[in-house]
Amino acid sequence: MVTVTHVVGTRHDPRRWWALGALVASMLVLAFDSTILNVALPTMAGQLGATTGQQQWMADAYVVVFAALMLPAGLLGDRFGRRLMLIAGLAVFLGGSVLGALAGDVNAVIAARAVMGIGGALIMPLALAVLPALFGPEERGKAVGLITAASALGMPLGPLVGGFLLNHFWWGSVFLINIPMAAIGIAACVFLLPETRDPATPKVDPVSTALSVAGLGALIYAIIEAPDRGWGDGLELAMFAAAAVLLGSLVLRERRVSRPMLDMGLLTHRGFLLNTVAATLVMFVLSGLMFAVPTYLQAVLGHDAFATGLRLLPMMAGLLVAAKGAQPFVARFGARAAVSAGLVVLAFAALLGSRTTVHDGYGFTALWLSITGLGFGFSVVPAMDGALGALPAARAGSGSGLLSTFRQVGGAIGIALLGSLLASAFRDRLDVAGLPGPAAHTARESVVAAHVVAAHTDSARLAASANMSYVHGMTLVLLVCGAAALLAALLAALLLPSTPVVRHMPREEDEETPAVAAPVADAGQ
């Protein structure tokens, strides 16, 4: 049976928490995939004969497509139904996972990852877009915290699950694990999640869509390739210039049309803009930090993939504490204080981590990882809540797409810049004296490669130098992360609104919102 229900009515429906469970299930699909492939790459490279560049694109094909499509994906959800597009995204992600499991060569794996990126682009912004319709300001912070916790759950569980699968099955099993998870997410959305849409949303403009996809694709591609090619490489400069021209053309086009696809007006709302910037800076710091730590646990401390996942759990524990405590903190002290304090805690964790040495063992790392999770939760949850709260209900999809795009680009920049810093510091510090030219070149590629060369040449000196060089590079990364978090904390303290912004739109629009709400399927009746 289908009943007509205003979107705002779902805020008092006891099933809204079951609907949140459907969103959490959807985000878990992405959370697992975000880290599980990294565990399988060495095995896949050996069996498929992939080069270093091909390995990179097995991971990055997903990121490029994902970031490039999030803006039009949010608009499609606003227009045709957020639940419908979320289910479509999960279905596409499931199909891409099947293709990945059946792939027989590197190019097929890369193509499958690109298909999965299309699904991911629909899942993330639309999962966030549904929250303002389900929860009022008093509950939305808790809901955002649970969504964030689900996203972060993939950090430790991805390596755990991936390590187990690779120990017992073939490499394609890391794709197969997505199939039941995506199926559960689809079922949860069908039976638990109400439909919301805005029929008045502007039609998808093919030209603007092409400009946004091409511009963001060129930007992310350039960021990803920069550490290998060098920031001054001719192709890099050309891609950055192309991205600037394409995205600039998009902005000019959208400012001239009467019903723009990309709602630039959202960026004029102080609450949305500044909270989005804060969430993006948090992702920059966290992405760089999480790029360095797993390799430290595996290559320097000598743990396998499964054990590495276990040792990332303290960060998850800190995040869960923050997810539970952020909302009461915001209620008492305000969102600005929560975001600023969270960023200070994140900075403290990074600076504490920069004191790590090769002789510290895991206990010290567990300490600053738990503090990292605490700072991440206290900063990103109120920031995302504030950004979502500033969105009018009719533009939740397009606004969430914009928020997700900024966060994804921030994460990609963090990995590219801080990864390049780490690689450069490692190469400069590594002692390869006495090694033949080819062996020295291989050792400088990564700490893992250096350990392989050390094992083949029976050189304990090279292994020790590799560990010390990597920790030196990680120290620099953590120092930059700490400085960036402190700068972000200062900006948040000075500029953020003191309390979450519920709406920045005229009252007339608020009163009209229920009129454009879609019929809500009364699931199970």
Image (cartoon, rainbow, N blue to C red):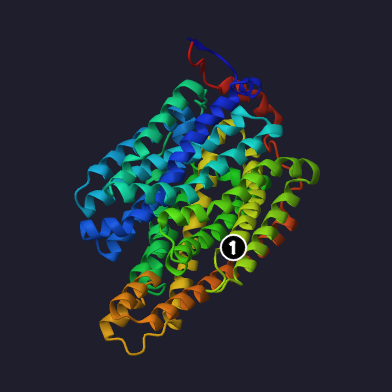
Q: Quadrant of residue 272?
A: top right
Image position, residue 485 (x, y; %): 64, 62
Residue 375 seen in render:
yes
Image position, residue 263 (x, y; %): 54, 42
Category of crowding for the residue at label 1, using alpha-carbon neighbours closer than 10 angstroms: few (below 14), some (14–19), many (at least 20): few
Q: Is residue 182 above or below residue 234?
A: above
In the image, 33 versus 268, the foreground residue is 33
**Total marks placed:** 1
- In the displayed structure, does residue 443 sit left or right of residue 75? left
Q: Is residue 244 above or below residue 430?
A: above
Q: Which residue is mark 1?
A: 363
Residue 259 seen in render:
no
Image position, residue 111 (x, y; %): 27, 48
Q: Is residue 271 above or below residue 195?
A: below
Q: Residue placed at 27% from the left, 85% from the top?
A: 437
- In the displayed structure, does residue 456 sit left or right of residue 22? left
Q: Quadrant of residue 99?
A: top left
- In the displayed structure, does residue 168 sit left or right of residue 347? left
Q: Residue placed at 40% from the left, 62% from the top?
A: 224
Residue type, mark 1 in image:
Gly
Secondary structure beneath label 1? helix
Q: Residue placed at 40% from the left, 72% from the top?
A: 447
